[in-house]
Image (cartoon, rainbow, N blue to C red):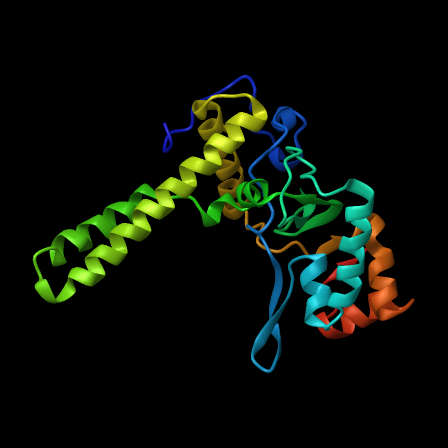
Amino acid sequence: MRNKFIPSKGLKITKNLMNSKRKNRFKLTVGFTGSYKIYYSDIEKNNVILIVDSLYSLLKNFKKENIWKKFKEDLIKKEGNKCWICSEDDKKLNAHEFWRYYPIKNGKGKKKLVSVHHICTKCHAIQHFDNHFVSPERLKIEIKYISEIWHDTSKQDEVKTRLEKIIKRIKREKELIQHFCKVNKCSETDFWQHWNGVQQEKERLKNNSYSEWNIVDFGKYKYLLKEAFGKNWRRFIQLNFGSGIQLV
């Protein structure tokens, strides 16, 4: 079930699935963010490629975390100490940025920051499920390697460590899928349909060379950039990231 996409009336592959209302029949979804980062390989400072990955990372790059910290405190006062998605209490709430992606043409696109909300550890992990997905291909390679060193007495500690990591990852993946199903009141089959649909859309955009989202709209959160960099914040960012990035 996990490797084959199964068509579903509830999930429609559209030109812009990441913005599709039909995808959002789920309260909790696998995040599309993080798969495509805006970067310019020809703009480097101290051999570090500058990335406009998120509002938080932008503030962090220029040591303005105090503004983000204040924003998070205000968000707690507004939304409380519960997860915005599943309403569960969590001492480690993550301020997650919800971005929408709009392919335009010639491999370029626009990304817009729609909202920022505090979400629990599990909901946040599902937003970044790529980091927790146990790839069957990778699992086969790992198991094959373990079988090759299984009888090597000098590598028994490595065998044990690798097996423990595999079991831990599988348990974590299962835990997250169960959380997804609980929040959305759906089956595991529904989850894999959703997951495979998102992966298909990512691959489609990749094949169409949508690798750079050079038009960035920080939406209603522009005031944080103005507070951090002054009224000419657009010019400040472009001076540091180059004219290739367009801020709206």
Left or right placement of residue 59 versus residue 44 in this view: right
Residue 229 visible from this viewpoint: yes
Q: Is residue 46 above or below residue 105?
A: below
State the residue in front, 157 or 4: 157
Q: How many marks?
A: 0
Q: Residue furthest right?
A: 231
State the residue in front, 209 or 92: 92
State the residue in front, 173 or 202: 173
Image position, residue 51 (x, y; %): 63, 65
Image position, residue 169 (x, y; %): 37, 46
State the residue in front, 242 or 228: 228
Residue 12 visible from this viewpoint: no
Is the C terminus in the top left, top right, bottom left or bottom right quadrant?
bottom right
Left or right placement of residue 217 versus residue 190 in this view: right
User: Measuring 36% from the left and 33% from the top, which residue is drawn there?
Assistant: 3
Image position, residue 141 (x, y; %): 24, 50
User: Measuring 28% from the left and 46% from the top, which residue is drawn there?
Assistant: 139
User: Measuring 64% from the left and 39% from the top, which residue is drawn there?
Assistant: 89
Q: Is residue 92 above or below residue 51?
A: above
Q: Residue furthest bottom?
A: 46
Left or right placement of residue 11 versus residue 248 in this view: left
Q: Is residue 158 above or below residue 91?
A: below
Is the N terminus in the top left, top right, bottom left or bottom right quadrant?
top left
Q: Is residue 118 above or below residue 88?
A: below
Image position, residue 84 (x, y; %): 70, 37
User: Measuring 48% from the left and 28% from the top, which residue is drawn there?
Assistant: 191
